[in-house]
Image: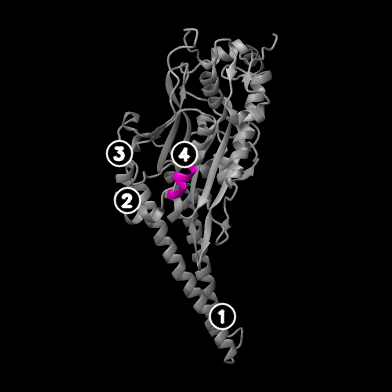
């Protein structure tokens, strides 16, 4: 959430930041609400100070010998009660104004970092680096490289038709070595991140509205999420949501930062508006598995933390021998809560293209302000900075592995790092149907 003080004192800075995102927003109404809230706060504070002075005078007069029911003391107490009533009225008006202001601010995205490249569309995103040599051309036999869904069907490790019967389209069931590979990837990634100092969490996958609001998914992305009909609970769209709220409303101890977490969760998204794209395979599903990376850090450390978090996600791709490239998103392509983002795109050999497999973002204090997360710093408290990234999306990793390791005989060679987890160096299993 954007800073109310900045909105009140320098709305032009907010307008300029939103303009870099390609947004023209009239900030006059929220600015007036913020100013009125500040005026009421100041008025209430002055009244409370006056009430305290009257209370002290009452004590002083009684100590000096005045009778507790004397006219002088009675008048002072009546004045104190009048001030208390005024304070209560102001507090109620403040709560109403604060609610109105919150509703205005919840719909506004984070401001881009000054380091974020300016752009008008995703075409202005900037390629930062490439790693690995993409597999191109054909199989040794001269046959064309196949896409992952073709390979998976040939191996009998994915069942789509029965999954539609169980749920609906955009769901899959993994069988045999497919299920084993998915489980192996989850364990491999969690083990790797834990070895690098991340604390592993296994959070709830049902989250309340406050958690979605704190991370920035609500109210803007309500239509993209699955909600339980009878409870204030939603299926989490990403582990970023419960990880943000793990410390919601807390003041973290001095010296405790950075806090680095990794978590596996199933993730659920409606993918509204994406029909017609990636209708086959593991790329765009309503339910998918993901391992998340999440940092809480001091503001002055967040730029370096962003580089480290991204490098930790890249290290998984390198260990799996999957070529990738790092793309820095321009201002027009940033996610709602992000101030700066690197996308990692893995090479899909059969499709002959790079596809996003991780977004690594720094959110500044945007999520921390929404979720009320601070840390002690000397004699004061400050908002933490939060960062998140996929480390990695499991289904897309599997898709890349299938296409990268495909062989003429229909099997798939696995990278050495996965062999201890899978128990074999290739996938050859065919499940009877």
Rendered image quadrant of residue 116: top left
Q: Residues within 10 Å of mark 4 (few under 14, many from 20)?
A: many
Q: Quadrant of the C terminus?
A: top right
- Residue 74's label in the rendered image is 1
Residue positioned 51% across, 57% down in the render: 92
Residue positioned 55% across, 33% down in the render: 237
Q: Which residue is mark 3?
A: 118
389 displayed left or right of 246: left
Q: Are marks 2 and 1 in contact (CB under 8 Å)?
A: no
Q: Is residue 179 above or below residue 2?
A: above
Report the span colored magenta.
304-309
Q: Position of residue 301 (x, y in %)?
A: 45, 53
Tell me which label, 2 or 4, sits earlier in the chain. Answer: 2
Q: Position of residue 374 (x, y in %)?
A: 52, 56
**What is the spatial separation of the Cα atoms under label 3 and label 4, in whole angstroms?**
18 Å
Which mark's residue is nearer the viewer, 3 or 1?
3
- Residue 11's label in the rendered image is 2
**What is the spatial separation of the Cα atoms under label 3 and label 2, in whole angstroms?**
20 Å
Q: Which residue is mark 4?
A: 360
**What is the spatial separation of the Cα atoms under label 3 and label 1, in whole angstroms?**
66 Å
Q: Are marks 3 and 2 in contact (CB under 8 Å)?
A: no
Q: Are marks 3 and 4 in contact (CB under 8 Å)?
A: no
Secondary structure type for disc 1: helix
Tell me which label, 3 or 4, sits earlier in the chain. Answer: 3
**What is the spatial separation of the Cα atoms under label 4 and label 1, in whole angstroms?**
65 Å
Q: Main secondary structure of the magenta part?
A: helix
Secondary structure type for disc 3: loop
81 displayed left or right of 341: right
**What is the spatial separation of the Cα atoms under label 2 and label 1, in whole angstroms?**
48 Å
């Amino acid at each position: 959430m954007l800073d109310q003080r900045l909105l009140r004192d320098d709305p032009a800075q907010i307008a300029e930041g939103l303009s870099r995102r390609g947004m023209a927003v009239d900030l006059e109404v929220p600015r007036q609400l913020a100013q009125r809230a500040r005026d009421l706060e100041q008025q209430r504070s002055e009244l409370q100070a006056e009430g305290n002075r009257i209370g002290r005078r009452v004590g002083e007069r009684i100590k000096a010998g005045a009778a507790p029911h004397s006219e002088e003391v009675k008048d002072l107490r009546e004045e104190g009660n009048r001030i208390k009533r005024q304070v209560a009225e102001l507090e109620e008006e403040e709560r109403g104004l604060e609610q109105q202001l919150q509703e205005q601010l919840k719909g506004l995205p984070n401001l881009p970092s000054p380091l974020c490249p300016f752009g008008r569309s995703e075409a202005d995103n900037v390629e930062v680096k490439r790693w690995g040599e993409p597999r191109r051309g054909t199989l040794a036999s001269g046959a064309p490289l196949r896409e992952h869904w073709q390979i998976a069907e040939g191996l009998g490790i994915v069942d789509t038709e029965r999954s539609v019967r169980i749920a609906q389209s955009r769901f899959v069931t993994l069988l045999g070595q497919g299920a084993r590979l998915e489980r192996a990837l989850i364990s491999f990634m969690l083990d790797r991140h834990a070895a690098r100092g991340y604390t592993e969490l296994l959070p709830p996958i049902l989250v309340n509205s406050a958690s979605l609001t704190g991370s920035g998914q609500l109210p803007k992305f309500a239509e993209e999420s699955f909600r339980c009909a009878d409870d204030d609970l939603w299926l989490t769209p990403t582990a970023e949501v419960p990880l943000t709220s793990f410390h919601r409303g807390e003041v973290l101890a001095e010296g405790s930062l950075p806090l680095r977490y990794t978590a596996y969760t199933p993730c659920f998204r409606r993918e509204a508006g994406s029909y017609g794209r990636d209708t086959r395979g593991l790329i765009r599903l309503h339910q998918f598995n993901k391992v998340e990376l999440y940092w809480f850090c001091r503001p002055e450390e967040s730029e370096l933390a962003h580089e480290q978090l991204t490098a930790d996600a890249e290290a998984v791709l390198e260990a799996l021998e999957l070529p990738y490239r790092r793309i820095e998103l321009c201002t027009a392509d940033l996610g709602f809560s992000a101030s700066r983002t690197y996308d990692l795109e893995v090479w899909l050999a059969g499709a002959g293209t790079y596809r996003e497999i991780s977004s690594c973002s720094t959110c500044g204090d945007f999520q921390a302000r929404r979720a009320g997360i601070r840390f002690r710093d000397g004699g004061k408290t400050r908002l933490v900075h939060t960062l998140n990234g996929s480390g990695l999306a499991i289904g897309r990793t599997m898709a890349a592995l299938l296409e990268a390791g495909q062989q003429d005989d229909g099997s798939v060679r696995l990278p050495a790092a996965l062999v201890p987890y899978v128990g074999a160096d290739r996938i050859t299993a065919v499940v009877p149907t």
